[in-house]
Image (spheres, coloured by chain):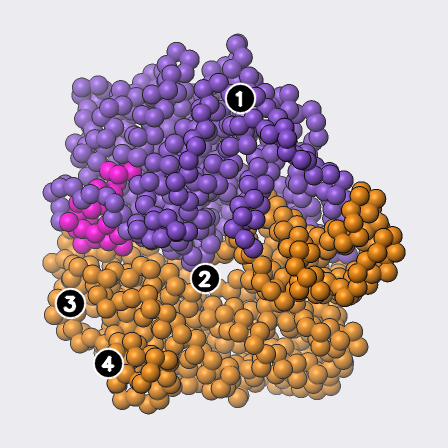
Amino acid sequence: MTRNNQTKRHQTRRMLMSRRNVLRASTGACLALPFLASMSPSRSRAGGLPPIKRFLPIYFPNGASQHWWTGMDTSGVGAQWQLSKVLSPMEAIKSKVTHIRNLGNYTSMQDSRQVEPSHARCTAAYLGCVNADAQDNRNGVTVDQLLVERAGFDTPIDSLQVGLSTFSGFFDGRPWHYNQAISWRASNGTYPTEPLRRVISPREVFEDLIPWAKPSDPTSNPVDARFGESILDEFLAESAALKKKLSQSDALVVDQFESRVRELEILTGEMGMGHDVIPGCEPIADIPFDVPDSDQELQGVANQNGVMVDGVEYQREVHADLMNRLIVMAFQCDLTRVVSYMLDDARSPFEYSHVEIEEFGGTTGSLNFHDGAQHNADPLNNAYASITKWFAKKTTDLAQLLDDIPEGEGTMLDNTLMLFGSGMHSDDHDAADLPIVLIGGGSTFAHDQNVVLPAYPEDRQLRDLHYTILNRYFELGVDSFGDDLTGAPNEELSEILA
Amino acid sequence: MSYRGSKRALLAVFYANVLVGAGCYQGMDEHAAGGSDGTGGEEPTTTGSDDDDTPMSEHDVGRIALHRLTRAEYENTLADLFGAPFEEADFIRGGTGVGFANQAELLRDISDDLAEGYIEHAQVVSEQVFADPALRSQVASCTPTGSDTSCAVEMIESFGLRVWRRPLDPEEVTRLEGRYLDALEFGATPEEALQHVVRMLLSSPNFVFHVEIDDAPDDATPHRVGAYELANRLSYMLWSSLPDAELFELAASGELLDQEVLLAQVDRMFDDPRSERFQRTFLQAWVRLPLLDAQSLLIDTEVSPAWSLELGADMRAEIEAYLREFTDAELPWSDFLTADVNFVTPRLAEHYGMQPPEGEGMVRIEDHPDERVGFLGLAGFLTYTSRANRTAPTLRGKIVLESLQCTELAIPPDVPELEPEGEVDTEFPSIREQLEQHRASPACAGCHALLDPIGLSLENFDVTGAWRDRYEDDYEIDASVDYRGEPINGLIDLAHRVSEEPTFMECPSEKMVAYALRRTPEGDDRKIVGEISDEWDVGSIRELVKLVVASDAFRFRRGISDTEEN
C-alpha cells in the first residue's frame, strides 16, 4: 500500500488507541457519552485539587560500570557527598537528587544475588519485584501501573511506555517482553497481566499525544457510525456462536478477543476529540526522523548510528533528545502523569558510537554495549563507564527540561518523581547494589544525599523503595508491594524521606 | 580484542547461559528409554486400514488448543486469498525467538493492540481489495445490484468458505446477507455493501483463529478430525496458509480422510512453491537460522575485517540450499552432519579457501578436500553460534544439543560463583582451560561435560566460520576432546560421532510432531514420537512428514476432560 495510506491509517489507529485508554481510565468498560465533559483539561487545573504528581521511571540495561560508585561508599548530605564522574552530569540538579546504595532485587526469586538468566529476569523484575518466571512467563503489576490503577489520574492517556531500543538483543529463552518492557498492567485476558506497549517510534509517541494536545478539526467528516456498529454486531454474533461450540478453556480465548473488540471506538463510532487548548501546552512541531518499532523476535532496524531508516540517518543521540522532548510535551499538556522509559532494551548490543570515550582509568574497551563494554576483559574499561555516563546525561537533560518549566510553587521537576537505574549491578550481572537514583518529586524526599544501606546480604530490596514511593509520595496506602520468598514484609525506606 | 583478552567476557557469559548441575539434561534421552518400551510388540500406527474410525494405537492422541494464526500464517492467508501480499501485519508480535512460532500455547493471548490490529487490518485490506479490480475479482465474479442479494450470497458462500476455511452454515449465510442489506439501508452502494461484508469476514474470530469444532468437545476418547480441519492442519503445516481449491474439494467429498489420498497430497504440496514456507517455518526455525540475520548486523568487523552483509547473505543462501538437499533432493537425515556438500558464491568460496567458481551465482560443490563437512561445517551455522567478537564453544554445544539432539538443558536455580574477582586472566591462559575449570566444579560438570566437547572440537572455525590454526594471540588451537568417553579430534570426528547418537535420528520426529501438532510433545505424544521415529527408515524429511501426517495424533483428537478444564 502507499506510504500515504499507511500514515493515514496509522494516525487513525493511534488516535483510537488514546481514546480507548480514556474509556478504560474513566469507566473501566465500554461507555458512550458523556465523557467529554470529564475530559476537560481544566480538571487538573481547578483550584482545590491535590497537587500534580507524576512518576517517571527510567531504566538502562547491562548494569552500570563500577565507576558509577567511585567515591560513593559512605552516606552523606549536601557537601558531604560527591557525585562520581559517571554521575557528574547530575551536578546541576544535585540538590534534587538522592543516590541510594545496596538496594537489591533478588529475594522475590531466590536467596542470592546471582539471578539467572540475568538480563531478562532482572529487567522484568525492575518495577514489579516478582519472579516473572514463576508467573507462567508473565509478570506482576508493576509499580507505575499499580499507581495508574489506584491513583485515577483522569488524564487522556493512562500512561506511556517509551524506549530507545532499535535492535532486539537476546531473550535468554524468555518471551520478548521480558527484555523489552518494564511496565506490566493487570489484564482480563488469559493471563493476569500484560506488558504495556512500548513505543520507540517518536512519531508514534507524537501521534499518541497530538490528538489530545490540539483542538479537534470541526470540518472533518465523521464516518457513519452505523457501519462500525454493524461490524461489531456481527463480530459479537460470531463470537457467541463460536463460544458455544468450544471447550471452556478455548471459549475463554475467544472471550478475551471479544472483550477487547467491544472497546474499540473504530466500531463503536465514538470518534472525534473536541476539547480545548491546554494552557502552557506547546506541541512540538517537528519529528525530524522516525524509527519503526522493532519488538519482533530477532528483528531490528539499526544496531548502530548512521544506518539509514526510511531515508533518514539514525542517530541515537537525536532519538534520545526527541524522546525527552516528547515526554516533556506529554507532561506539559497534562496528557499523562506516568511515563516509563527504557533507555535501551535488556542485553542491548547497540554500538554506542556517538558516545565519546572518556578517561576513567581503565583500558579503552568497546562501545558495543553488551558484548564489548559489559563483557570485557577489563570490567573497568572506559567505554562501559562512558556509556553509563551517557545514560546519566540524558536523564539529567530530561530533568533539566522539566526543571525549567515553572509549575505551582516550584517547577515541573518538583512535581515529577524520576527513578533512574537498572535491574543489574554491573559487569558481574548481580541483582544486588543496583544503580539507583531518585530525582525530583519535591519536598517528600530529603534529597541532596547519598544513602548507603547495609551491604549484601544484609541489604534492602527495591520493592521497599517502590512501596515507599507508593505510600509516601503518592499516599495510596498500599499494604505491600512485590514478593519476598523469605516472607519479609515491606518496610519503608525512611532514610530517603524528608 | 585478543582472544586472551576476552576470557573474562567468556566467563561472564557463562553466568548468563550455562546450564549447570549433575542432572543437566532431560528430553530425548529420557524419552528414548521409555519409547522403546512402549513400542515393543506393537504394530506401527501407520499401517492397517485407512478408513477405520478408531485410532491404531491406544495412545492419548491429545488435542490442539484453540489459538490464533501466527503472523506469517495471517499474512500468507491474506496473500493467498487475494493473490497478492498486503502490508505487513506488524501488530502481531513475535515470540521467544527460540522454537517454532506456531506453538498453540504462545498464541492464545489477545492483547488490546492485537485485537485492534485485527479489526483495523480487516478494514484496510477490504478497502484495498475493492479499490483494485484484480484483487476484487478474487472475492466474487459477479457484480451485486441493488437489493438483489444473489451476488452477495454467492460471495458469502464461496469466498466465505476460503476465509473461514470451512463451509458457512445456513444461519451464518443468512445473517451476513442481512448485513449486506443493512449496509444498503445505511446508504452504501451495492459494491460498498459487499465490501462491508468482506470486512466482517476478515474481522471474525473464524478468520483469526485456528478453529477446530469438536463435535464431542467433552469426550476424552479419540475421534476423527473432520475433513476440512484435516485440510487445514495439512495446509498450515506445509504452506503456512489456507487450503487450496483441490484440498477444499477433497475435504468436501471426504476423500481426504482416505490415507492414500492424504499422503498423495503431501507429495503434491511438497512440490508446490508454497512449500518454501515449510522450509522457513519448520526447517530454518529448527536449526535457528534466523539467528544469522541478527548476527550479521552484530559481527565486530575489527575482529572479522572480511565480514560483509553480502557474505552473510551468501551464508544464509548456502544453509537454505543445504536444507533443501534433505527435502527436495531427499538426502537421508543420517547424512545431515556428514554430507560433504557446500553451496558457494565466489565470495563464500574465498572465505572457505576454495577455488572460486566461475560466474557470480551459487554453485554446488561436493567432496571438497578440507576439514569441513556437513551442517556443522557451514560458515553460517558457525557464525550464528558465535558472539560478535569471539567464538562461544558453549553456545555451539548448546545449539547442537538442543536443536539436533533434542537434549534440553535445564538452567539450575542458583549458579555458584566460579572464580574470585580478578584472578581469571592469570590463572587460566586458554579457553580450553577455562572450560576445564568449569568441568572441575561438581556443580558445573553435568552441563559442561555435554557442552564443551562439541564446542571445543569446532574451535578451528572462527567467529565467521573461517578456518584457523591459532587464536589471535597465537595460542595454538587444540580441537581434540573426550566425547562421551571416546577421544575425537575436530569437526569431522564430531560430525560422525554425533550422527551415531540415537538421539540424532530420533530428534527430527520430536521436532516434526511438535511442529505439526503445534505443541511440545509430552505424555503419550512422546510414545507417538517414538513410534514414528522407529518407523522412519527412509530417513528423508518428506518421509517423516508423511509418517506424522498419517499418525493418529494428526488425524484424531480427543475432547477435553473435566480435570483439565480446571
Dot 3 or dot 2: first in sequence order is 2
Is residue B80 part of the magenta span, yes or no? no
Depth check, mark 2 against mark 1: the one in front is 1
Q: Which mark is residue B353?
A: 4
Disc 1 from disc 3: Cα separation: 64 Å
Give the residue displayed 28% in from the left and 35% down from the top. Answer: A392
Say what secondary structure mark 1 lies in.
Answer: loop
Q: Which mark is residue B472?
A: 3
**Contact check, label 3 and label 2, Cβ < 8 Å:** no
Identify the residue under disc 1.
A277
**Contact check, label 4 and label 3, Cβ < 8 Å:** no
* x and y percentages locating residue B503 in the rendered image: 45, 77
Disc 4 from disc 3: Cα separation: 19 Å
Report whether mark 2 lies on the same chain as mark 1.
Answer: no
Which chain shows up in purple? A
Q: Residues within 10 Å of mark 3 (few under 14, many from 20)?
A: few
Depth check, mark 3 against mark 2: the one in front is 3
Q: Which mark is residue B98?
A: 2
Looking at the rendering, the stretch of residues picked out in magenta corresponds to A364-392
Visual hue assigned to chain B: orange
Kindly identify the amino acid type of the residue bearing the numbered disc 2. Answer: Val
User: In the figure, residue A30 lies in which quadrant?
Assistant: top right
Disc 4 from disc 1: Cα separation: 69 Å
Depth check, mark 4 against mark 3: the one in front is 4
Q: Is residue A150 visible?
A: no
Chain letter of mark 3 equals: B
